[in-house]
Image: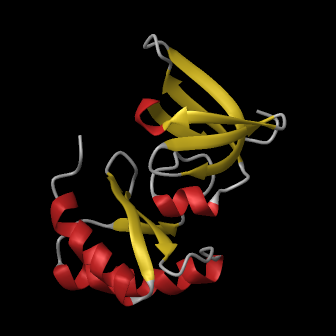
Amino acid sequence: MPHPLLPDITPVAASTAAAHGFELVEIQILTHLQPMTVRVQIRCTDGSDVSLDDCAGFSGPMGEALESQALLTEAYVLEISSPGIGEQLQSDRDFQTFRSYPVEVLYRDDEGREQRQQGSLLERNADHVQVNVRGRIKRIARASVISVQLISPTG
């Protein structure tokens, strides 16, 4: 269940990120940790990687923005990070960024059964997701694709 302050904090985080050249990926409020933790994930709007210096540099303005809104009334820890590997690919940008990376595609075949296909991501277009499987191109109808997940090179 999302924290009740999330709808109020998300726009603050998104506008602060945008003002500093980042895109807000996700924000979480973890109340089961002591002190409470506000976890903010960002990515660079220009497509470059988020560095440790980027996270450290964004921490101050993000903390100031949260404090100025006075939404959080108890002590908290602010964590700034980037999404990292192991995530599902969703946006066109994700598919461009991770072209040639090893992926696992979960999809439904013609009989409606779930199937998994591992290979190197070639591309996603309006109609298909294309994966290189041991030198052969496997085209999977985009409408049949359930998810595309990054995997480690060994599977």
What x and y, as percent, mark residue 34?
A: 39, 53
Relative to 117, 35 lies left or right: left
Q: Residue at x 82, y 36 (%)?
A: 154
Rendered position, 111 above or below 41: above
Q: Can residue 83 be seen by looking at this rendering? A: no
Rendered position, 122 above or below 107: below
Rendered position, 72 above or below 147: below
Q: Residue at x 17, y 61 (%)?
A: 7
What x and y, as percent, mark residue 31?
A: 31, 50
Q: Residue at x 60, y 24 (%)?
A: 116
Q: How many marks?
A: 0
Relative to 7, 123 lies left or right: right
Q: Residue at x 56, y 42 (%)?
A: 129
Relative to 37, 9 lies left or right: left
Q: Which residue is more in the foreground, 79 or 118?
A: 118
Rendered position, 25 above or below 63: above
Q: Which residue is more in the foreground, 74 or 98?
A: 98
Q: Which residue is more in the foreground, 91 or 51?
A: 91
Position of the C terminus, as image quadrant, is top right
What x and y, as percent, mark residue 65?
A: 28, 84
What x and y, as percent, mark residue 42?
A: 46, 70
Position of the N terminus, as image quadrant, is top left
Q: Quadrant of residue 50?
A: bottom right
Give the image's coloring scheme: secondary structure
Q: Can residue 13 be seen by looking at this rendering? A: yes
Relative to 148, 118 lies left or right: right
